[in-house]
């Protein structure tokens, strides 16, 4: 695994732990900038960590993504938001300990 993807895993795990959220995610845009997020669970708004990280990247001007990571206790996440920006960017799905369960 390349060091930049390892960095995304560490950032996603740290964000999840810091916020006490179910999931943590991190994405890297076409310029190498990273964005991290956790699950948003409000009465009027529900976003997965991955959706939130993608939204943050787009709101900051990202036009494409190079890679994405989601740390989740659940199974395969919805990656539609990532695919809206990048059809072939790898999405690493990690267990809570950071081990990669699958790449989508």
Image (tube, rainbow, N blue to C red):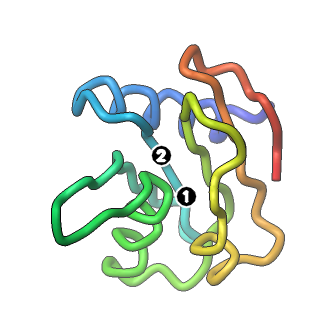
- Residue 64 position within the rendered picture, expressed as x and y whole percent measured from the top left: 61, 79
Residue nearer the viewer, 42 or 2: 42
Q: Report the side of 1 relative to 51 (left or right).
A: right
Q: Residue at x 66, y 64 (%)?
A: 79
Q: Report the side of 96 relative to 75 (left or right).
A: left
Q: Residue at x 36, y 27 (%)?
A: 14
Query: Between marks 2 and 1, how big is the CA–CA gap?
Result: 10 Å
Label at residue 98: none
The answer to whether residue 43 is above or below residue 9 is: below
The answer to whether residue 29 is above or below residue 69 is: below
Q: Which residue is mark 1?
A: 28
**Pointer 1 local density, CA inside 10 Å: few below 14, some 14–19, many at least 20:** many
Q: Which residue is mark 2?
A: 25
The answer to whether residue 26 is above or below residue 53 is: above
**Pointer 2 local density, CA inside 10 Å: few below 14, some 14–19, many at least 20:** many
Circle 1 — which element? Answer: strand
């Amino acid at each position: 695994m390349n060091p930049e993807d390892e960095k995304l895993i560490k950032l996603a795990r740290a964000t999840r732990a810091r916020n006490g959220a179910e999931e943590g995610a991190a994405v890297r845009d076409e310029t190498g900038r990273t964005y991290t997020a956790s699950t948003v669970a409000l009465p009027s708004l529900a976003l997965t960590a991955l959706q939130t990280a993608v939204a943050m990247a787009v709101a900051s001007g990202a036009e494409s993504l190079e890679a994405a990571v989601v740390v989740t206790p659940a199974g395969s996440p919805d990656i539609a938001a990532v695919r809206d920006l990048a059809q072939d960017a790898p999405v690493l799905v990690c267990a809570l300990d950071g081990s990669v369960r699958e790449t989508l």
